[in-house]
Amino acid sequence: MTSAICYCNAKIHAETGPIEKGWLTAEGGRITAFAAGNAPENPAYSYRNCNGLHVLPGFVDIHIHGACGHEFMDAHALAFRSIAQHCAQHGVTAFLPTTWSAPQEEILNVLHQLKRTMKEGTGSSRILGAHIEGPYLNPRFSGAQDERHLRPIDEREVQRWLATGIVRLLALAPEIPAAMALIEQVVEEGMTVSAAHSGARFAQLKQAIAYGLKQVTHTFNGMAPLHQREPGILGAALSLKELSCEVIADGIHVHPSLVNLLYQIKSKDRLILITDSVRAAGLPDGSEYEQDGRVVRCNDGAARLADGTLAGSTLTMDRALLNLSEWTGNSFTELWPCASLTPARAIQLDHEIGSIAVGKRADLVLLSAEGQVLETIVAGETVYRATSHH
Ligand code: FE
């Protein structure tokens, strides 16, 4: 299938550091070599001149619910493929489809459909497994998660999820009964647990960390605000180095100054850019749709329920990275780990993806000097090319 390709004349942002002008070879879907200077001549290679573009590792979105009028809860392969294509357009080479609070059979059905599509492939951005957000959440901080579907932890339900073998990330509120035992069990089985939609006390977060909790879901959103005498989940997210923090950097969910603050504290090793995008992403402004019988309206890049509650985002990963760049004053060529390596590490796939290193998958994104996505490459195959670029 994949032949040997040599991308040359590129600004390569490798895990070991940037190369101002270099080349990179990919074979069998993996990165086989890269170095500074002119590409070695080899008749086995087909050559691609990158014309001085930036080559970054493909972005990894570990929290995405949908896009382009589709959602993973639709449990349909065509919906999955359409979302995958949207991802590829924005530089995402691998992603973790995210479910939300819904009846037991519905979530399970999504997992089974995802597993099927993972086997068949999407033809573009790759599905990495599943992220289950809810239904074990605190109703006081449910946000746009439908409260009617929140429920106590059900050990048998969890077993059915895990039996699919594709769950990589579980987001729950650590303060709900039996959460600690569940965290311990899920972490022992090799998955990651993130604290979400929660009003947990600081001490509960410390306890959850001792049981293996490592992450905080969309930091600042769906959680109790900061209190100086009870730092709670937000205080824990900010102050405890064990916790990596997801953040929705769309300028709507969190004020840019707080995204900058989070970056100053967490650095690129602990800040995870996510989109948390929903059906509305990639749809025109003014679009409207129904979700669980509730109307969602999209205006000025925000998707909201009738009462104004944010119902996920319309953010894309390329935009998120550029926003972070603007708000922190650092170049996207420095911040790239927040969009690839850090999320890959969060779901324990950094040995495979997330950076440019020999042996890793040849999942790459070619960007202009301004950070515009011009080409997306999955396992050495171009899956997206901007029409304006030749
Ligand atoms: Fe959420």
Image: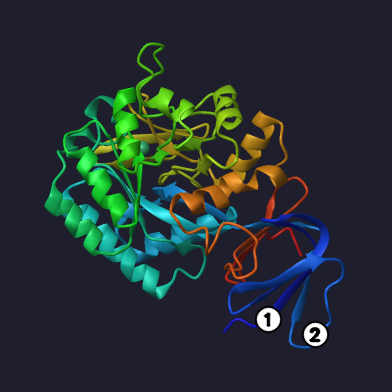
> Where in the image, quadrant-wise, is ligand 1 located?
top left
Q: Given contact means CB atoms under 8 Å apart, are the residues at marks 1 and 2 in contact?
A: yes
Residue drawn at point x = 26 percent, y = 46 percent:
184
Is 68 in front, or is 14?
14
Q: Which mark is residue 42?
A: 2
Q: Is mark 2 within 8 Å of ligand 1?
A: no
Position above or below: 163 against 243 = below
What secondary structure is found at the residue carrying circle 2?
Answer: loop
Residue drawn at point x = 30 percent, y = 23 percent:
201
Q: Amino acid at mark 2?
A: Asn
Q: Can see residue 87?
A: yes
Position above or below: 306 against 32 = above
Residue 98 is left or right of residue 134, and the answer is right
Residue farthest toward the front in the current orientation of the protein: 210
Q: Which mark is residue 4?
A: 1
The number of discs equals 2
Q: Amino acid at mark 1?
A: Ala
Q: Quadrant of the C terminus?
A: bottom right
Label 1 Cα crowd, 10 Å radius (few <14 / some 14-19 / many 20+) = many
Residue drawn at point x = 51 percent, y = 28 percent:
252
